[in-house]
Image (cartoon, rainbow, N blue to C red):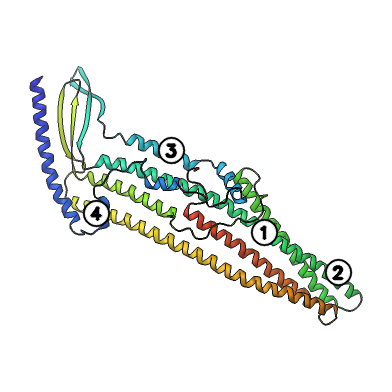
Amino acid sequence: MVDTTYRALTRGVSAAVLALALAGCNGGLIRGAVSKSPQSPGQDALAARPERKVDGSAVIADLAARHSVIPPGSGYDRIARAVLAADAGTARADLRVKKLTAEARARNWLPSLGPSVSLTSLSSVATSLLLNQTLFDFGRRKAEREYAVADVEVAAVNLSVDANKRVYQALSLYVDAEAARARAGVARDALARLAEFDRIMALRVRGGVSNMSEQTVLKQKLNEMQATLQADRDAEMLAASELDAMAQAPVSASAGLTDLPGAMPGVTPLAVHLAEAQKERTLAELKVGRADYLPGLGASINIGKGGIGVSGGIENGLGLGNKAALEAVTAGADAATARVAQAARDAARNKQALELKIANLDRQEAAQADVARQMRANLKRFEEQYKAGVRPLMDLVTQHENLAAMERDLVNMRHERARARLEIARDLGVLADGAGI
């Protein structure tokens, strides 16, 4: 028994020496791979650092600390709560799977125990338990744990994205329904005025004051306004039915728009958090791939036979392509880092575009509202002139038609601005409370 153990230890020491020699050889490859770009951000990202864990994740902590910008008790809040309560929870289930996987991977540093079966002769089979323990693996197991943590972060960001997207879709439908309802109100008022003008025109035609062509034109305008009113009612019903289907309950009865804050400085967009989490996952995956080109060292004990062994080796072996493979790891880290910077630039540009759109809509609405006020004042003068016989009836009809078109444009601007504010809040991930998600 002593001789057997001694021989096993001797073989193990020999293997360890070989592994260290290989480490020196591949260490030169590592230095050669990274010496060409000493300032590469990918090298900094791949450098050794404290191990990341789910409990201390800055990404998850930031997501959980976010508060919804929707005022409590408002119509928006009622819809958002109903829609989130009706969510099927697919993203939430995916996050739970990732968390359990990370919990299991967090113990991958422990030794593994498994059966060992060998054929000792043609008529007998020897069974035993084999205990394996990794001694040195160039950070492979640590990278596997970091990959699992980053996978949880990606799932957490996707959950927040999914919840905010769902709330945005519901509130966007609500805004569509409100816009259609407001436009229908404008069309209904205009239709009532046109109907009155049509009654007057019919009397004028019968009295010989006006001709049939004017009455025909007025009838066409009346029919067009009726079609517009029906289209607005259909759009309202469609948006309201879709909204109620999303919430699985009638919530479209709310009325009015809710003001949301415009500028929200200091809030990191969800797209940037997602890029950060995906970068960490990519870096962990690259570290695992790099370890496959570097030597590892392990120990094993055959409990049934009492044998002790130390083994060393390289997963992918030694080859002329190893140096290029290691350089590809650094290049992949550079690309992952660049994607985060690109995501930050894209998010900032999109937010700036939406803010400029809101500012333009505010300016256009103010200008058009002033023109509408002037048109209403002119209408009063037109009506007085019509009654005095100075203005023809069709001029008055045209003015009322133009005023209705302008009021519909004002409605669209007001609701388009509300939708743009919802887009900003959605991209920042503040349409739903992070802790509630």
Mark 2 secondary-structure assignment? helix
Q: Nearer the viewer, residue 317 or 361?
A: 361
Q: Amino acid at mark 4?
A: Gln
What is the total number of numbered labels drawn onto the structure image?
Answer: 4
Q: Nearer the viewer, residue 375 or 271?
A: 375
Query: Which mark identifies residue 180?
Result: 1
Task: Find the residue positioned furthest to the right.
Answer: 207
Would you place residue 307 above or below residue 367 in this image? above
Q: Answer with mark 3 or mark 1, whichever residue precedes in sequence.
A: 3
Which residue is identified by label 2? Answer: 199
Please tell me which residue is depicted at 33% across the width and 49% down the height of the picture.
280
Which residue is identified by label 3? Answer: 96
Would you place residue 410 above or below residue 40 in this image? below
Q: Residues within 10 Å of mark 3 (few under 14, many from 20)?
A: some
Q: Is residue 313 magenta?
A: no
Query: Which mark identifies residue 436?
Result: none
Q: Answer with mark 3 or mark 4, whichever residue precedes in sequence.
A: 4
Q: Answer with mark 2 or mark 1, whichever residue precedes in sequence.
A: 1
Q: CA distance from mark 3 to mark 2?
A: 68 Å
In front: label 2 or label 4: 4
Which residue is identified by label 4? Answer: 43
Q: Amino acid at mark 1?
A: Ala
The reply, left or right, for residue 274 in relation to residue 190 is left
Q: Amino acid at mark 2?
A: Arg
Q: CA distance from mark 3 to mark 4?
A: 32 Å
